[in-house]
Amino acid sequence: IWRMGDEALYWVGVLGGAAKLCVQLEDGRAVTLCSVAGSWIGEVELLRGVRHSCDAVALHDLTVVQIPRSIFEQLWMQQPLFQTFLMQLLAERNLQLMSLITAQQHSGTVARVARCLAALITPLNFPFAKGHWLNVPQSELADYCNVSRSRLSEALSQLHRAGLIEVGYRSVQLVDLEGLRSFTGLLEAPAVT
Protein backbone atom coordinates (compact mmCIF):
# COMPACT_ATOMS: atom_id res chain seq x y z
CA ILE A 1 0.00 0.00 0.00
CA TRP A 2 2.95 2.26 0.86
CA ARG A 3 6.59 1.98 1.84
CA MET A 4 8.37 3.56 4.77
CA GLY A 5 9.56 7.00 3.68
CA ASP A 6 6.79 7.51 1.10
CA GLU A 7 4.98 10.83 1.26
CA ALA A 8 1.63 10.53 3.06
CA LEU A 9 -0.91 11.54 0.41
CA TYR A 10 -4.02 9.58 1.47
CA TRP A 11 -5.96 8.26 4.40
CA VAL A 12 -6.51 4.61 3.50
CA GLY A 13 -9.59 2.57 4.39
CA VAL A 14 -9.32 -1.22 4.26
CA LEU A 15 -12.73 -2.27 2.90
CA GLY A 16 -12.00 -5.91 2.11
CA GLY A 17 -9.17 -8.18 3.13
CA ALA A 18 -6.57 -7.29 5.74
CA ALA A 19 -3.34 -5.33 5.91
CA LYS A 20 -0.48 -4.98 8.34
CA LEU A 21 1.70 -2.10 9.38
CA CYS A 22 5.28 -3.30 9.76
CA VAL A 23 8.92 -2.24 9.89
CA GLN A 24 11.70 -4.13 8.09
CA LEU A 25 14.78 -4.79 10.22
CA GLU A 26 18.32 -4.74 8.85
CA ASP A 27 18.49 -8.55 8.99
CA GLY A 28 15.43 -8.84 6.72
CA ARG A 29 12.90 -9.73 9.39
CA ALA A 30 9.69 -7.72 9.63
CA VAL A 31 8.22 -6.47 12.91
CA THR A 32 4.43 -6.27 12.68
CA LEU A 33 3.03 -3.28 14.54
CA CYS A 34 -0.65 -3.97 13.95
CA SER A 35 -3.06 -5.56 11.52
CA VAL A 36 -6.26 -4.02 10.27
CA ALA A 37 -9.40 -5.09 8.44
CA GLY A 38 -12.42 -2.86 7.99
CA SER A 39 -10.54 0.09 9.40
CA TRP A 40 -8.40 3.08 8.46
CA ILE A 41 -4.63 3.61 8.39
CA GLY A 42 -2.26 6.47 7.74
CA GLU A 43 -3.87 9.17 9.87
CA VAL A 44 -0.83 9.66 12.12
CA GLU A 45 1.39 10.79 9.26
CA LEU A 46 -1.34 13.03 7.86
CA LEU A 47 -1.92 14.67 11.25
CA ARG A 48 1.78 15.17 11.87
CA GLY A 49 2.67 16.15 8.29
CA VAL A 50 5.47 13.58 8.02
CA ARG A 51 6.40 10.73 5.69
CA HIS A 52 5.28 7.18 6.45
CA SER A 53 7.27 5.66 9.32
CA CYS A 54 6.46 2.04 8.42
CA ASP A 55 5.34 -0.16 5.54
CA ALA A 56 1.65 -0.92 4.94
CA VAL A 57 1.35 -4.35 3.33
CA ALA A 58 -1.65 -6.32 2.04
CA LEU A 59 -1.96 -9.73 3.74
CA HIS A 60 -3.99 -11.10 0.82
CA ASP A 61 -6.44 -9.74 -1.77
CA LEU A 62 -7.28 -6.25 -0.62
CA THR A 63 -9.85 -3.58 -1.43
CA VAL A 64 -9.05 -0.07 -0.23
CA VAL A 65 -10.45 3.42 -0.53
CA GLN A 66 -8.15 6.44 -0.44
CA ILE A 67 -9.20 9.84 0.86
CA PRO A 68 -6.83 12.59 -0.36
CA ARG A 69 -4.89 14.51 2.26
CA SER A 70 -6.73 17.78 1.44
CA ILE A 71 -10.14 16.22 2.19
CA PHE A 72 -8.80 14.49 5.31
CA GLU A 73 -7.44 17.83 6.58
CA GLN A 74 -10.72 19.60 5.80
CA LEU A 75 -12.70 16.99 7.74
CA TRP A 76 -10.21 17.18 10.62
CA MET A 77 -10.43 20.96 10.83
CA GLN A 78 -14.20 21.35 10.36
CA GLN A 79 -16.01 18.26 11.63
CA PRO A 80 -16.10 17.59 15.40
CA LEU A 81 -17.56 14.09 14.86
CA PHE A 82 -14.65 13.25 12.57
CA GLN A 83 -12.22 14.51 15.20
CA THR A 84 -13.92 12.34 17.81
CA PHE A 85 -13.75 9.27 15.56
CA LEU A 86 -10.04 9.84 14.91
CA MET A 87 -9.29 10.19 18.60
CA GLN A 88 -11.18 6.96 19.33
CA LEU A 89 -9.33 5.19 16.51
CA LEU A 90 -5.95 6.40 17.76
CA ALA A 91 -6.76 5.49 21.36
CA GLU A 92 -7.86 1.99 20.35
CA ARG A 93 -4.77 1.48 18.19
CA ASN A 94 -2.61 2.61 21.11
CA LEU A 95 -4.30 0.08 23.41
CA GLN A 96 -3.95 -2.61 20.73
CA LEU A 97 -0.23 -1.90 20.39
CA MET A 98 0.23 -1.93 24.18
CA SER A 99 -1.59 -5.30 24.34
CA LEU A 100 0.62 -6.68 21.57
CA ILE A 101 3.84 -5.48 23.23
CA THR A 102 2.72 -6.92 26.57
CA ALA A 103 1.77 -10.21 24.91
CA GLN A 104 5.13 -10.49 23.17
CA GLN A 105 6.91 -10.16 26.52
CA HIS A 106 5.44 -13.45 27.77
CA SER A 107 8.15 -16.05 28.09
CA GLY A 108 5.75 -18.87 27.26
CA THR A 109 5.08 -19.25 23.55
CA VAL A 110 1.49 -20.45 23.99
CA ALA A 111 0.57 -17.50 26.24
CA ARG A 112 2.27 -15.12 23.80
CA VAL A 113 0.30 -16.50 20.86
CA ALA A 114 -2.98 -16.50 22.81
CA ARG A 115 -2.64 -12.88 23.85
CA CYS A 116 -1.36 -11.69 20.48
CA LEU A 117 -4.35 -13.30 18.73
CA ALA A 118 -6.73 -11.66 21.20
CA ALA A 119 -5.05 -8.28 20.66
CA LEU A 120 -5.98 -8.44 16.96
CA ILE A 121 -9.73 -8.17 17.51
CA THR A 122 -10.81 -4.63 18.36
CA PRO A 123 -14.05 -2.80 17.52
CA LEU A 124 -12.43 -0.12 15.34
CA ASN A 125 -9.20 -1.67 14.04
CA PHE A 126 -10.35 -5.21 13.20
CA PRO A 127 -14.16 -5.17 13.28
CA PHE A 128 -14.85 -7.52 10.37
CA ALA A 129 -13.72 -10.76 11.98
CA LYS A 130 -17.14 -12.41 11.62
CA GLY A 131 -17.46 -14.94 14.39
CA HIS A 132 -13.88 -13.95 15.21
CA TRP A 133 -12.55 -15.79 12.14
CA LEU A 134 -9.12 -14.55 11.09
CA ASN A 135 -8.44 -15.30 7.43
CA VAL A 136 -4.74 -14.66 7.76
CA PRO A 137 -1.98 -17.12 6.77
CA GLN A 138 -0.19 -18.73 9.68
CA SER A 139 3.12 -17.28 8.48
CA GLU A 140 1.65 -13.80 9.02
CA LEU A 141 0.28 -14.80 12.43
CA ALA A 142 3.75 -16.09 13.35
CA ASP A 143 5.24 -12.70 12.42
CA TYR A 144 2.52 -10.89 14.37
CA CYS A 145 3.13 -13.04 17.45
CA ASN A 146 6.93 -12.83 17.03
CA VAL A 147 7.38 -16.61 17.01
CA SER A 148 8.59 -19.10 14.43
CA ARG A 149 6.06 -20.80 12.16
CA SER A 150 6.66 -24.18 13.87
CA ARG A 151 6.22 -22.67 17.38
CA LEU A 152 3.01 -20.99 16.22
CA SER A 153 1.69 -24.31 14.96
CA GLU A 154 2.44 -25.99 18.31
CA ALA A 155 0.81 -23.12 20.22
CA LEU A 156 -2.29 -23.19 18.01
CA SER A 157 -2.63 -26.93 18.67
CA GLN A 158 -2.49 -26.37 22.43
CA LEU A 159 -4.97 -23.47 22.27
CA HIS A 160 -7.29 -25.66 20.20
CA ARG A 161 -7.08 -28.46 22.79
CA ALA A 162 -7.88 -25.89 25.49
CA GLY A 163 -11.06 -24.96 23.57
CA LEU A 164 -9.97 -21.37 22.93
CA ILE A 165 -9.63 -21.53 19.12
CA GLU A 166 -10.57 -23.54 16.05
CA VAL A 167 -8.03 -23.91 13.26
CA GLY A 168 -9.06 -24.12 9.61
CA TYR A 169 -7.34 -23.89 6.26
CA ARG A 170 -5.60 -20.45 6.23
CA SER A 171 -7.83 -19.33 9.10
CA VAL A 172 -8.18 -19.33 12.86
CA GLN A 173 -11.42 -18.82 14.80
CA LEU A 174 -11.03 -17.17 18.19
CA VAL A 175 -13.70 -19.09 20.13
CA ASP A 176 -13.05 -17.59 23.57
CA LEU A 177 -11.66 -14.07 23.23
CA GLU A 178 -11.59 -13.35 26.97
CA GLY A 179 -9.94 -16.71 27.62
CA LEU A 180 -7.22 -15.81 25.12
CA ARG A 181 -6.75 -12.36 26.66
CA SER A 182 -6.24 -13.81 30.15
CA PHE A 183 -4.36 -16.97 29.12
CA THR A 184 -1.36 -17.63 31.36
CA GLY A 185 0.01 -20.71 29.66
CA LEU A 186 -1.01 -23.02 32.46
CA LEU A 187 -3.30 -25.65 30.99
CA GLU A 188 -5.20 -27.65 33.55
CA ALA A 189 -4.35 -31.31 33.66
CA PRO A 190 -7.32 -33.57 32.99
CA ALA A 191 -9.03 -34.80 36.14
CA VAL A 192 -8.11 -38.33 37.21
CA THR A 193 -11.14 -40.56 37.81
Image (spheres, rainbow, N blue to C red):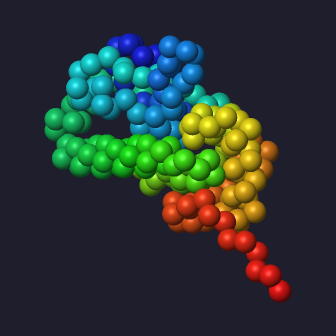
**Extreme residue in the right direction:** 193
Which residue lies most toward the bottom here? 193
Pick whichever, 20 or 79, lies toward us. Answer: 20
Closest to the observer, 148 or 79: 148
Q: Position of residue 101 (x, y in %)?
A: 43, 43
Left or right of 130 in this view: 66: left
Q: Residue at x 72, y 72 (%)?
A: 189
Side (left or right) of 78 relative to 108: left
Q: Is residue 86 left or right of residue 168?
A: left
Q: Is residue 105 left or right of residue 137?
A: left
Whether residue 191 appears in this view of the structure is yes
Give the percent coordinates (x, y) of residue 128. 55, 50
Q: Quick check: 157 above or below 142?
A: below
> At 47% from the left edge and 38% from the top edge, which residue is drawn?
34
Q: How many marks?
A: 0
Residue at the image position 34 percent from the left and 44 percent from the top: 94
Q: Is residue 62 visible?
A: no
Q: Where does residue 9 sit, x and y in percent of width and height?
A: 34, 19
**Picture quarter with the C terminus:** bottom right
Query: With respect to residue 81, does 52 lie above or below?
Result: above
Q: Residue at x 62, y 47 (%)?
A: 109
Q: Position of residue 176 (x, y in %)?
A: 61, 65
